[in-house]
Amino acid sequence: MKKHILLISNLIIIFSLIAGFIGVVYKQTKSYQNLAEEYLANILSIAEVDITKQIENAMTKPVMVSKTMANDEFLKKWFGNEKENQNRDGYMNELYSYLNAYKEKYGYTTVFCVSEQTGNYYFQDGLNKKLSENDEHDIWYYNFIKSGNEYDIQIDTNEADGNTITSFVNFRMESEDGELLGVIGVGLEISDIEGIVRSYEENYNLSVYVVNVRGSENSFGKDTDVFVSEEELARRTGIQNKILTDFSTEPSMKWFTSPNERKCIITKYDENLGWYLILEKDTISINRSFQKGIMDNIIFMLISLAACIMVTTAVFLNFNHRTIEMENTDELTGLPNSKLFYRQYRSFVRKHHEHRKIIFMFDIDNFKDMNDTQGHLFGNEVLAKVGESLKKTVEGHGIAARWGGDEFIGALDAGPQEAEGILKGFMEDLRNLEKEKGYIVTVSVGIAEIHKPFSAEQLIQKVDEAVYISKQNGRNQITIYKPNH
C-alpha cells in the first residue's frame, strides 16, 4: 500500500512538473497573472493594516472624548436641572462654554448635545434647534436611541455648520439611575478621514471605500468619495456579486473577474467603528511589470511548488478535519462532544447572524434511578436512543451535542416559541419510546435566546438555570429563560 502511495505521489509531482512546463511554454500570460495576484495580495494586506491603524487612531480619540463628556458629572447635573433653568442666560452659557472648550481643545468642527427632556439641540455656539420627529433631518436621534447602542458613528450633514458633510460620534448620556438624559458627541469634517485614505490610495495605487453599517439611519442618503453605500460600492467596483458577506474582524480577500480585468478585494469589519473597510486593486499594471522581470525557470519552479503544496495541504486538511471529528464524537450517541460543540456553535452563530436563534439544554429525568434499577446497559441504550432522536429533530434546524452524562445541548435557527414547538415534538417522540419494564423516557428542557452581547458560556449558564427550573416544577417540561428568573 505504501508503494502505491509513493507511486501516486511521484506521478502527481511529475504531472505537476509537466503541467508547469506546458504552462511556461504555452500559457506565460496566465503564469504571470498568478504571480501578479500573489504580489498584489501582499501589497493589499500591508495597505489594509496601515489604513486600519490610521483610521482607528483618527476615530478612537473622538469616541473617547465623547465618552468622557457623556460621563461628566457636570453635564449630568446640568441636564438634571435644565428644564427649570433653560430661560436663564447664565445657566445656558455654562453649557456653551463647556462645549466650546472641547471644540477649541481638540479642534472639532462641532461639539453638540441633545436633551431628551426638552428636545433641544445645543452646540458650542448656542441653541441650534428643537428636535422633532417630523423633521427629516432629526431622524438620526430617534433611530440612535431606538438602536440601544452606547455609541455610533454617522456620516450626515451638519446644520450648525452650513450643511457640510460631517462624521459625527453620537454617545448615549444617562443619569446615575440609568435614565436617558440625551446624546452628546463631536463632529469632524469628513475630509479629515478622507485625507488619510487618499494618501494611501496614491501611495499604493489602489481604491479604498468605507461602508458604515452600524450608524443609525439619517437623512443623508448620498455618497462621498470614500463613504459609500453597498449599492454604490457595487457600482464603483463594477462587481455585482455580494462583496460584504459577514461581520468578520479578520481581513477577507476575494478575487473577481470582469470582461476587461481581474480585481482583488479585501474587506474587513471594524466592530469599534461599525465600518467595513474595502480595498480594491486590479492586476493590469502589476502584470506588465512582472512579465518584464521574471524568468521562465522561476515561473516553472513556483507553479510546480504550488502544485505540491496544494496536494499536501489538501491531504493534511482532510486528515486533520476527519481526526478532529473522530476524536470529538461521542461513541455512544454519535453526537459531537462539548469541545466540538463550541466550534460548531461559533460557526452556527456566524451563519445565522441575521436570524433569531436559541440555545437549549436538557437532561434525562431520573436517569440515575434508571441506571440503579434497570442497569447501565439499559441506561446506555436510552442515551443512544435519545441521541438518535435528537439528531433527527435538529436536522435542518440547527446543531446538537452530548454535553456530558445524561445532559445534551444544542442550538436551533428559530425563535423561542418556534423552538419550543420543535422540542415538544422531540419530547413526544421520546415518550413514545416505551422501554422494557414499562419505562418511559422524559426530559427537562431549558431554552435561552441567543443575543450578541452574551458569550457561549454566559448563555449556557442561563439555559442551565432554565433546566433547573423545569426540574423544580416537576420535570418533563420546557422552560424559556427570562431575565427575571
Image (cartoon, rainbow, N blue to C red):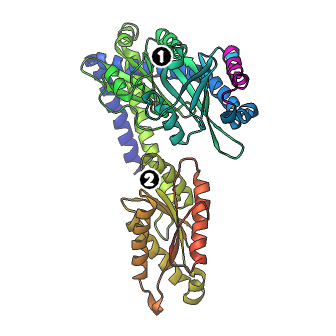
Q: Which residues are magenta?
A: 86-104
User: Quadrant of residue 14 in the image?
Assistant: top left
Task: Please say whether residue 26 is one of the residues in the magenta stretch.
Answer: no
Residue 80 visible to an observer of this rendering: yes
Three-letter amino acid code of the residue under disc 2? Arg
In the image, what residue occupies the spot 68% across and 33% down? Answer: 82
- Mark 1 sits on what residue? 163
In magenta segment, residue 99: yes
Q: Secondary structure at mark 2?
A: loop
Please give the residue where the numbered disc 2 appears in the rendered image. Answer: 356
Residue 198 is labelled as none
Q: Position of residue 235 (x, y in %)?
A: 31, 22
Decide: few, some or many residues near mark 1? Use Cα within 10 Å; few <14, some 14-19, many ≥20. Answer: few
* Quadrant position of residue 71: top right
Q: CA distance from mark 2 to mark 1?
A: 39 Å
Asked whether disc 2 touches disc 1, contact meaning CB atoms under 8 Å apart, the reply is: no
